[in-house]
Structure formats: C-alpha cells, structure tokens
Image (spheres, rainbow, N blue to C red):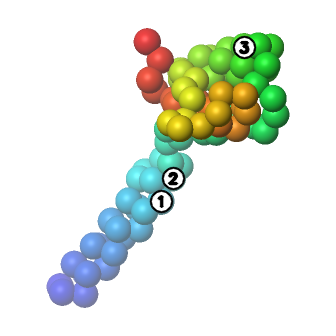
C-alpha cells in the first residue's frame, strides 16, 4: 500500500513537471530576433505577435533600436 502511494505521488510529480496532461508547456512570451528595430521590422513583429494573441513590449531599461530588446508577451492582448 505504501509503495503504491509513493509511486502514485511520483507519477503526479512527473506529470506536473512535463506540463500536465497536454505534455507541453504554454508559452507566455518570447524575445524577438536580432536586427535593427526599423518601422517595417517592428510592424511585422507586432502583426505576428498580435496574431498569436500577444503584445510587443520593450524590455525595461533596454535600448529601443534593437529588435531583441523587445518581447512578445502572449495572452496579454486586449
């Protein structure tokens, strides 16, 4: 009985560590690719992020001229 409880507990821990029943972990944000943050590059990244249900944000304290200084925060679009 004790062994069964321990194995069941380990099984639950493994399922949680692997993202639950779906097996995949939900993406909450990602950093944009490297490159110069031109109007066209930011527009394309914003459109892509918005299509995924996200919003582009500049990382706190970073320069706005580099694309990789921006994140697409998924699940925050209005």
Picture coordinates of residue 33, whole percent (x, y): 75, 37
Mark closer to the observer (2, 3): 3
Label 3: which secondary element: helix
Q: Name the residue under label 2.
A: 23
Q: Are the residues at dot 2 and dot 3 in contact (C-beta closer than 8 Å)?
A: no
Camera-side residue of 49 and 36: 36
Residue closest to the eye, 75 or 58: 58
The percent position of residue 22, horizontal first and vertical second, equals: 48, 47
Does residue 13 sit above or below 3 in this rendering? above
Element under disc 2: loop
Which residue is drawn at the image coordinates 65% and 33% (left, top)?
A: 63
Q: Find out whether the residues at labels 1 and 2 contact each other: C-beta distance under 8 Å.
A: yes
Label 1 or label 2, whichever comes before in sequence order:
1
Alpha carbon distance from label 2 to label 3: 33 Å
Q: In which quarter of the image is residue 56?
A: top right
* Residue under pointer 1: 18
Report the disc number at residue 43. Answer: 3
């Amino acid at each position: 009985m004790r062994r069964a409880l321990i194995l069941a507990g380990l099984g639950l821990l493994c399922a949680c560590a692997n993202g639950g029943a779906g097996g995949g972990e939900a993406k909450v944000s990602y950093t944009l690719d490297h490159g110069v943050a031109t109007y066209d590059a930011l527009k394309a990244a914003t459109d892509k992020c918005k299509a995924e249900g996200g919003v582009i944000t500049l990382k706190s304290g970073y320069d706005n001229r580099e694309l990789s200084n921006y994140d697409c925060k998924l699940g925050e679009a209005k």
